[in-house]
Amino acid sequence: MTSNGSGTAGAVLPDTPPGDGSAAIVELRGAGKSYGNVRALHGVSLAVHPGRVTCVLGDNGAGKSTLIKIVSGLHQHSEGEFLVDGTAVRFSTPREALAKGIATVYQDLATVPLMPVWRNFFLGSELTKGPWPVRRLDIARMKRTADEELRNMGIVLDDLDQPIGTLSGGQRQSVAIARAVHFGARVLILDEPTAALGVKQSGVVLKYIAAARDRGLGVIFITHNPHHAYMVGDHFSVLRLGTLELSADRGEIGLEELTNHMAGGAELAALKHELAQVRGVDVQELPDSEDLRAPAPAPASSEGTP
Ligand SMILES: Nc1ncnc2c1ncn2[C@@H]1O[C@H](COP(=O)(O)OP(=O)(O)O)[C@@H](O)[C@H]1O
Ligand SMILES: [Mg+2]
């Protein structure tokens, strides 16, 4: 498992197993959080390494947002430990997390739709020129820098003057990722970045998640889609009702098993049985737990599934 202080800050490779090379940037040890008497998260351990994507999966209400709110400084944990670079921390504001290089891209992106792309890229951190008190926005430098940074991530936009609201959802997420990289993020947290996107746009976002990882960032990718997770993930942590149900490296789990963990095969079968008793609900289309255990492209048998 993950070990701290192994001392070897080796090369950052996407497929380096955790603990083999670099130490964790962010680590939770038995962390938990209660809101009043609602226990949203309990006993969760998780490590984020540079150059690796840690996927946090789970159904609605599983505690995914609570987990990232702790890491991003919005909430404080009420049990366990939270470490950054091996030191126990307790952030009071997202600004403190950001100062440690922990950046969060939220689902509802904090962009101003009518402002140009380059302006959004520098929102809140505008470049200026000239001496006080006549400092002006350094528009040329902001445009140039935004263009360079986007290209470095492989993002090519026709016109950085266009309002960011005219970009597709996937492109806007990409700009937000490039922005975090530019401003020195070491850990990038993405809360369900593909949830509202179609297949193609999701692909765009997954590509830039991989690009951020290849630039050495540790990525926490929140999703309830095991297929998206498996395309870029190095480690998978599945939450269920606030606890860690599964924590496995890519080499330890296949997509089928991950999907089954997510879907909760047995629960789904029970639900299907219950729904079958309700008039007007057609359960034919719902998958059985059997289907979930052995999804379509199993190389061994090709005749089983329709
Ligand atoms: N601010 C809050 N106050 C009270 N309960 C909360 C609050 N935020 C989340 N919860 C509860 O904590 C649990 C986990 O929620 P959340 O972390 O948002 O899950 P997810 O993001 O996986 O859908 C849920 O039962 C939710 O109702
Ligand atoms: Mg959530």
Image (cartoon, rainbow, N blue to C red):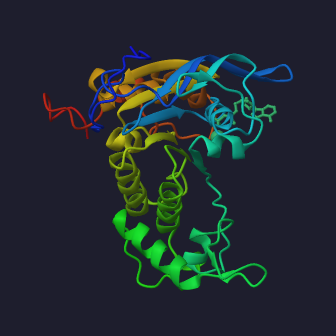
Residue 167 seen in the figure: yes
Q: Position of residue 161 (x, y in %)?
A: 53, 86
Q: Quadrant of ligand 2?
A: top right
Instruction: Look at 46% across and 19% down and name the residue there.
Output: 246
Instruction: Look at 65% across and 75% down and name the residue there.
Output: 113
Report the quarter where the C terminus lies. top left
Q: Position of residue 112 (x, y in %)?
A: 68, 72
Q: Is 224 on the left or on the right of 22, as rendered?
A: right
Count of labels in the image: 0
Q: Position of residue 186 (x, y in %)?
A: 49, 43
Return the residue nearer the eye: 130 or 178: 130
Instruction: Look at 46% across and 79% down and name the residue there.
Output: 144
In the displayed structure, 110 sits above or below 53; it is below
Q: Is 200 on the left or on the right of 272, as rendered?
A: left
Instruction: Look at 35% across and 38% down and name the residue there.
Output: 230
Q: Position of residue 86 (x, y in %)?
A: 53, 22
Return the residue nearer the eye: 22 or 114: 22
In the displayed structure, 190 sits above or below 298; it is below
Q: Is 87 on the left or on the right of 292, as rendered?
A: right
**Please, which residue is most extreme toward the right here?**
36
Q: Is 85 on the left or on the right of 65, as rendered?
A: left
Q: Choose top left, top right, bottom left or bottom right for residue 258.
A: top left
